[in-house]
Amino acid sequence: MQIISTIQELVYARTQWSGPIGFVPTMGYLHEGHLALYRQARTENKTLVGSIFVNPIQFAPHEDLNRYPRNLAHDLSTLESLGVDVVFTPSVAEMYPSGFTTYVVPEGPLATQAEGATRPNHFRGVATVVLKLFQLVRPDTVYFGQKDAQQTAVITRMIQDFNLPIALHALPTIREDDGLAMSSRNSYLTVSQRHAATVLYQALQTGRLAIEADPHSHPEEIVQTMKNVLARESEIRLDYIEIRDANTFLTLETLQPPALLLIAAWIGKTRLIDNFVLQANGTWNTGQFTEHAASHM
Ligand code: AMP
């Protein structure tokens, strides 16, 4: 496995690769959710490229950039064991040298509602770094997680808007045994917070069951039912529970698929997000349970 930390080296290395080229960008501290993306990408590509970069411009000043978990040595050995060919691990100065000026700013409900409302410059940071990485790696196929549904939708839209010759594969959310969506940020949780965190999944399940019981119920009723579940857990502070169109992120007046049940909540200083998808064909994508142990336990 080749580990590359400069753009100059990456641009040269790119001339040597044979296609198809698959790419999985991450912020590291890898868990089974990330690994599922790499495993799938490995089966579909000749050259598999990963990146590990904690992107400062997608964090607001008050957010967790400085304490975001990192373990590069562990991540690299994990990626090597999965058969990844190349890992790009640039420094912040390499990605954003002084004088850096140009940003990709997604607009409209897709980027300004839900996560975009709580984190105003977040998708500007995400789209900018992802476009830079796409330009450098020039992959045929990229792999993103349903866990970050809005991020995946923003990147899908950016690919269309900028006519990038890239296929995006969105893969299901990988969950712990009790349903908690895997996240690098789960490592922040104390034992009691970790226990409380399963209520996000329980609220999503309750929403799904309520919709199955009455597909004509009003989205507001479903949201209220889900809020009631979350309120049972005193350690949790709700940011939002919403039901939105899965493509546009507009709120839904009626339960029309494809729809997303979205949750964002605080547990102490940790902010977690999760979602279920009611797909266009009427089936649910609620994620998958992993049979593997969490990589950092
Ligand atoms: P991150 O390192 O958190 O920026 O995530 C990198 C990629 O992994 C993104 O495409 C995420 O959506 C995806 N990802 C993170 N957690 C999960 C999960 N539990 N299941 C599936 N994909 C995930």
Image (cartoon, rainbow, N blue to C red):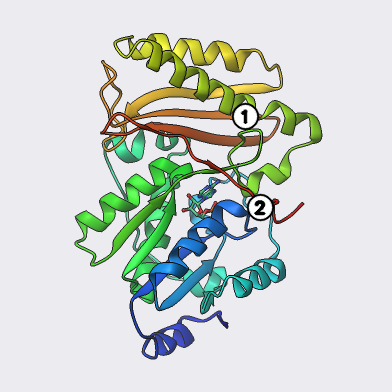
How many badges with numbers are in the image? 2
Whether residue 165 sits left or right of residue 212 in the image: it is: left
Do we see residue 97 in this rendering?
Answer: no
Q: Residue at x 58, y 36 (%)?
A: 272
Mark 1 surroundings within 10 Å by alpha-carbon count, few (fewer than 14), some (14 through 19), many (20 or more): some
Q: Residue at x 43, y 13 (%)?
A: 210
User: How far from the left and from the top, in percent, is residue 167?
Assistant: 29, 61
Residue that mark 1 sits on? 266
Q: Give me the C-alpha separation between circle 1 and circle 2.
A: 27 Å
What kind of residue is marked 2? Answer: His
* 284 relative to 150, above or below: above
User: How far from the left and from the top, in percent, is residue 275?
Assistant: 47, 33
Labelled pair 1, 2 in contact (Cβ < 8 Å): no
What kind of residue is marked 1? Answer: Trp
Residue 127 circle label: none
Residue 292 circle label: 2
Judging depth in this view, the residue of 130 and 77 nearest the camera is 77
Q: Residue at x 70, y 26 (%)?
A: 196
Do we see residue 117 in this rendering?
Answer: yes
* 160 relative to 285, above or below: below
Q: Residue at x 62, y 58 (%)?
A: 30
Residue extending furthest front?
Answer: 291
Whether residue 177 sits left or right of residue 273 in the image: it is: right
Pick whichever of labels 1 and 2 is earlier in the sequence. 1
Mark 2 surroundings within 10 Å by alpha-carbon count, few (fewer than 14), some (14 through 19), many (20 or more): few
* 110 relative to 75, above or below: above
Mark 1 element type? strand
